[in-house]
Amino acid sequence: MSDYLPISFEDRMGLVEFRVGERAHIGVDGDSCGGCSTKACVVACPANLFVPTSDGGILFNYEQCFECGTCYMVCNTEGAITWTYPDGGHGVVFRRS
Amino acid sequence: MIETDVLVVGAGPAGSAAAIAAARAGLSVTLVERGPFPGAKNMYGGVIYGRVLDGIIPRWWEEAPIQRWVTRRATMITTPTQALTVDFRTDSWGAPPYNGATAYRPDFDQWLASKATDAGAQLICSTTVVGLLRNAAGQVCGVRTDRDDGEVRAEVVIACDGVNSLLAKEAGLYTHTEAEHFTLGVKETISLPKEVIDERFGLRGIEGADYEIIGCTDGIPGGGFLYTNLDTVAVGLVLQLPALAAQSKRPEQLLAQLKAHPAVAPLIDGGEVKEYSAHLIPEGGFKMMPELICDGMVVAGDAAAMCLAAGIWLEGVNFAIGSGMAAGRAAAEALRLGDTTASGLAGYRRRIESDFVLSDHRKLADVADLIMSPRVQRSYPQLAANVLERIFTVTNPTPKPGFNRIIRDELASSGLKLREVMRDAWAGLKGYG
């Protein structure tokens, strides 16, 4: 099996409709992330929203979130991720799922 | 502020079924959905088994917005270079009352929600429920939403708020949620002309195919799926969370591997990705179910972990509808008797104990562990594929080895212990028997 990606990740996410709300519905406490050795969110988030920074922290962007819940389920640092739903009418809108 | 007899949170299949049942029992029903329309937040592994609808929508198959009727059901056992497929098809699934259908969830969920509004329920979209209201006695008596003046007071709340059910958690009904009981589903919807799909999958009219695939996840417990819509093919993976998190390939890379598999690639060749989607699945079944009832509230559908992931059976929408119907009817009964405490709502559990919803889950409670074991995920697929490859490889001038010899050889090189195999065979017979 090859590891080819037929489309870039940006193009892949560009196919999905997001009605981005003003409020970030997920919060990441960067201080907690510094001591985390696994950074499970980085590999597991299907939207690739968690980016490790050079100082050992995590950069997070809520805008293209599938609202799936994977990040807080795999996170092993209590309190590092605050997870809620976007405000009504906002967030991901699937069409052919 | 709104006051209503029954407040249903979430207009997915569970919530709409609950709203239909409660509204038809003559109650005032409010159905709150956080998406801009029902189904906007929903994705799944592809097949809706509709017979559960017989009880609320007679001849539902004449109007449900489905893509194709599944007449071909295949289980594909793969290694990186091999595939062994058990492929079943029957004409009987292509005629009423049918068996399974593929559908786009935004279409299907909007249709089912329209049945709830037809029955008199009030559907309010674009509204996120942010917490529970409780009365002085601690009984749930409504919810807070993110709308201005957004309280909704209700005699009974039916939480159908999906796999992450923040309401069931807030109510204390989940005493434990282990990541190992959840899988991440990722899926691509890939467009191809209808004629190409018909030809590649051997289908006519609106017949459809549904494949479950094992051995395609790099050893991460889970599996793959592939199914046909009218002019798209959906291909996806389910990946157990802790194992996904413990390795280094991202979900879309694992999905790219499946798409490149020699048995899968020709089926989707030349197609264009139209949508990428992801969702959690509560795969733990019976073992992860929360308490289903508390004073003033019941939980149904994925919110109550009612997704059935039992290897050859992968079902969720039907369990959501079945549990939602039972919840709506139990709420009506409780209101009629004037007791909406947990004991007044106990009819919910009685109803789903007596039909498929809890019976199937109870019966198959141990199967999930077997299916997710490294042996079923990796060793048995490799063993089966190697045995078949040996049987079908002609090695002239060497004479054919007997089956016994092949199986003994391959079992030995698989590293599997006969005792483990026998134990799994017994567990399988017991679980499925």
Image: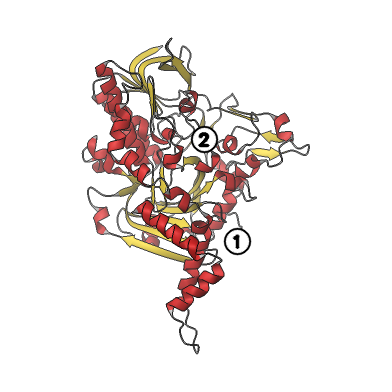
The residue at 58%/41% (across/down) is: A47
Residue B9 vs B390, above or below: the answer is: above
Mark 1 or 2, which is nearer the eye? 2
User: In x, y percent, where is residue B42?
Assistant: 44, 37
Query: Which quadrant of the structure image shows residue B352?
Result: top left
The residue at 42%/55% (across/down) is: B427
Which amino acid, mark 2?
Answer: Thr
Badge 1 crowding class, 10 Å Cα cut-off, few under 14, some 14 to 19, many 20 or more, is: few
In the orientation shown, which residue stands out farthest toward the front?
Answer: B419
Q: Is residue A51 visible?
A: yes
In the orientation shown, which residue stands out farthest toward the bottom?
Answer: B397
Q: In the image, is A88 to the left or to the right of B46?
A: right
The residue at 40%/62% (across/down) is: B200
Pointers 1 and 2 in contact (C-beta within 8 Å): no
User: In x, y percent, where is residue B290?
Assistant: 44, 32
Q: Which mark is residue B34?
A: none
Q: Which mark is residue A2?
A: 1
Q: CA distance from mark 1 to mark 2?
A: 36 Å
Residue B176 vs B101, above or below: the answer is: above
The residue at 24%/42% (across/down) is: B62
Residue B359 vs B176, above or below: the answer is: below
Q: Which mark is residue B177?
A: 2
